[in-house]
Amino acid sequence: MSKFVLTYHGTPAEMSSDPDEFKAEMDAWGAWYGSIGANLVDGGAPFSTQAGIAADGSDMDAPAALTGYTVVDVDSLDAAKAIAKGCPVLAHGSTVQISECIDMG
C-alpha cells in the first residue's frame, strides 16, 4: 500500500448559508469519505489564506489556488485516481491532483 495525497485546485468553495444546501454539500463529502472506507488516512481540510515564498526568500503570490487535501492509502496510482474521480470538488469546477508519498523510512 502507498499513501497518496489528493490536493484540490481551483476557486475556494464558499459554503452556502442555506441550511439545506450546506447539508447537501456535507452529505456529499460524507458519502465520498464513506466510499473510501478504511483507505481514508486523513480526511484533510479546506484551505483559505495563501501566500508564497520565492527561492530568494522574498514574498510572492501563491503559485496556484490550492484549496484543500485528503490522504488515502491504496495499492496503486490507478486506485487513487478512481477515488479522486468521486471527489465533491469536481462538481464545482475544481480539479484534483494525485501525488504519491515517497516512503523515506
Image (cartoon, rainbow, N blue to C red):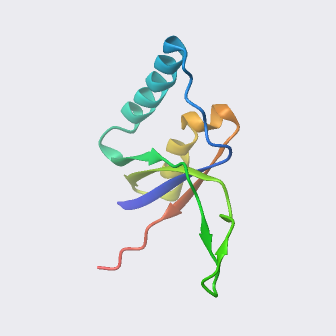
Position of 43 with respect to 59 (left or right) is: left
Residue placed at 64% from the left, 88% from the top? 56
When asked about the image quadrant of residue 104, the answer is: bottom left
**Viewer-nearest residue: 36 or 55:** 55
| Residue 71 coordinates in the image, percent (x, y) | 41, 53
| Residue 70 coordinates in the image, percent (x, y) | 44, 49
Q: Is residue 89 above or below residue 60?
A: above
Furthest residue in direction bottom, as rendered: 56
Furthest residue in direction top, as rendered: 20
| Residue 8 coordinates in the image, percent (x, y) | 58, 49
Q: Quadrant of the C terminus?
A: bottom left
Q: Is residue 17 above or below residue 104?
A: above
| Residue 94 coordinates in the image, percent (x, y) | 67, 42
How many numbered discs, if any? 0
Q: Quadrant of the N terminus?
A: bottom left
**Viewer-nearest residue: 4 or 93:** 93
Residue placed at 54% from the left, 38% from the top? 87
**Viewer-nearest residue: 56 or 88:** 56
Q: Is residue 58 above or below residue 49?
A: below
Residue placed at 68% from the left, 43% from the top? 11
Q: Is residue 104 above or below residue 38?
A: below
**Viewer-nearest residue: 6 or 77:** 6
Residue placed at 56% from the left, 53% from the top? 49
